[in-house]
């Protein structure tokens, strides 16, 4: 519970997210799979295109995807939301067909583009969490990890936020079902790994993490400037260490 409270107090301050709504895990990719167990096969999903493979692959495994189309290499029952330079690599939701679930990856892997609150309201601020948006706790689940911002990629530590306000159409709380899935399918992150997470969220540890993030952001800036100096179109590198380059031909 100590790590859950630390995540809530450090990373979700001001959003209303509580410690008991946070489920500590062994990483975001694992929780995406557990989330698919919650969703089941009788839902239609939309994904960003290009997309991190886990969103599509887990949809295929759970039976949401339909048939693979030979001509396009895409699945018939998945809605692919185009993310390109023309829409700042964020899908136009006004033209997206209605689905039961929309998967957002922010910052997007591989394009490096982050969802901004300007997509919802008139600001140019990159949000820390979807729960900064009013009403999001009634419709959203957020999955995140220590992998990128704290270098835990091989160590495996992450979390999922399932708000108490999120309910099925019959009024039953989604958090209770997800708790059952986690307790059944996961034995928990080790005490050693959780201690590392707590160290990262301490006052000195969090400052050290922020310093490392700034270092990588500067590296990304150098890469962007180098590619641009060669006359190439380059995107990303601002909110994540992903640089998306267009190579002619």
Image (spheres, rainbow, N blue to C red):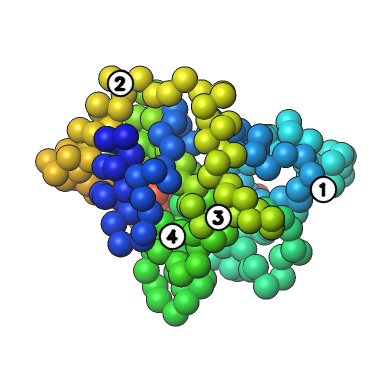
Picture residue at 44% right of the left edge, 27% below the top:
26
**Along the line of sight, the residue nearer the viewer: 176 or 63:** 176
* Image depth: mark 2 or mark 1 in front: 2
Picture residue at 54% right of the left edge, 61% below the top:
138
Q: From this view, report whether residue 147 is shown above or below residue 122.
A: above
* Image depth: mark 1 or mark 3 in front: 3
Q: Earlier in the sequence, mark 2 or mark 1?
A: 1
Q: Is residue 5 left or right of residue 87?
A: left
What mark, if any, has residue 191 been given in the picture? 2
Q: Which residue is mark 1?
A: 77
C-alpha separation, residue under disc 2 versus residue under disc 1:
41 Å
What mark, if any, has residue 8 been given in the picture? none
C-alpha separation, residue under disc 1 versus residue under disc 4:
29 Å
**Along the line of sight, the residue nearer the viewer: 213 or 138:** 138
Picture residue at 53% right of the left edge, 30% below the top:
182
Q: Position of residue 102 (x, y in %)?
A: 64, 55
C-alpha separation, residue under disc 2 versus residue under disc 4:
28 Å
Q: Earlier in the sequence, mark 2 or mark 4?
A: 4
C-alpha separation, residue under disc 4 versus residue under disc 3:
12 Å
Dot 1: element: loop
Query: Would residue 14 be seen by someone viewing this image from the given angle?
Result: yes
**Along the line of sight, the residue nearer the viewer: 55 or 53:** 55
How packed is label 1: few (under 14 Cα within 10 Å), some, or many (20 or more)? some
Q: Which residue is mark 4?
A: 131
Q: Which residue is mark 3?
A: 166
């Amino acid at each position: 519970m100590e790590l859950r409270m630390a995540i809530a107090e450090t990373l979700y301050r001001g959003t209303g997210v509580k410690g008991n709504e946070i489920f500590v895990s062994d990483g975001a990719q694992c929780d995406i799979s557990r989330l698919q167990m919650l969703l089941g096969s009788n839902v239609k999903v939309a994904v960003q295109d290009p997309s991190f493979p886990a969103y599509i692959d887990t949809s295929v495994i759970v039976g949401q995807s339909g048939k693979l189309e030979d001509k396009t290499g895409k699945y018939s029952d998945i809605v692919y939301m185009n993310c390109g330079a023309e829409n700042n690599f964020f899908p136009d939701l006004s033209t997206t067909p209605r689905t039961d679930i929309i998967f957002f990856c922010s910052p997007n892997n591989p394009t490096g583009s982050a969802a901004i609150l300007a997509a919802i309201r008139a600001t140019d601020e990159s949000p820390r969490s979807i729960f900064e948006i009013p009403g999001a706790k009634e419709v959203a689940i957020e999955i995140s990890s220590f992998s990128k911002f704290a270098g835990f990629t091989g160590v495996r530590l992450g979390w999922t936020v399932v708000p108490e306000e999120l309910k099925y159409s019959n009024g039953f709380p989604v958090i209770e079902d997800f708790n059952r899935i986690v307790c059944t399918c996961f034995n928990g992150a080790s005490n050693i790994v959780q201690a590392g997470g707590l160290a990262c969220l301490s006052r000195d540890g969090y400052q050290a993490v922020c310093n490392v993030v700034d270092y990588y952001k500067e590296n990304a800036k150098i890469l962007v400037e180098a590619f641009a100096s060669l006359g190439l179109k380059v995107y990303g590198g601002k909110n994540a260490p992903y640089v998306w380059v267009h190579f002619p031909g």
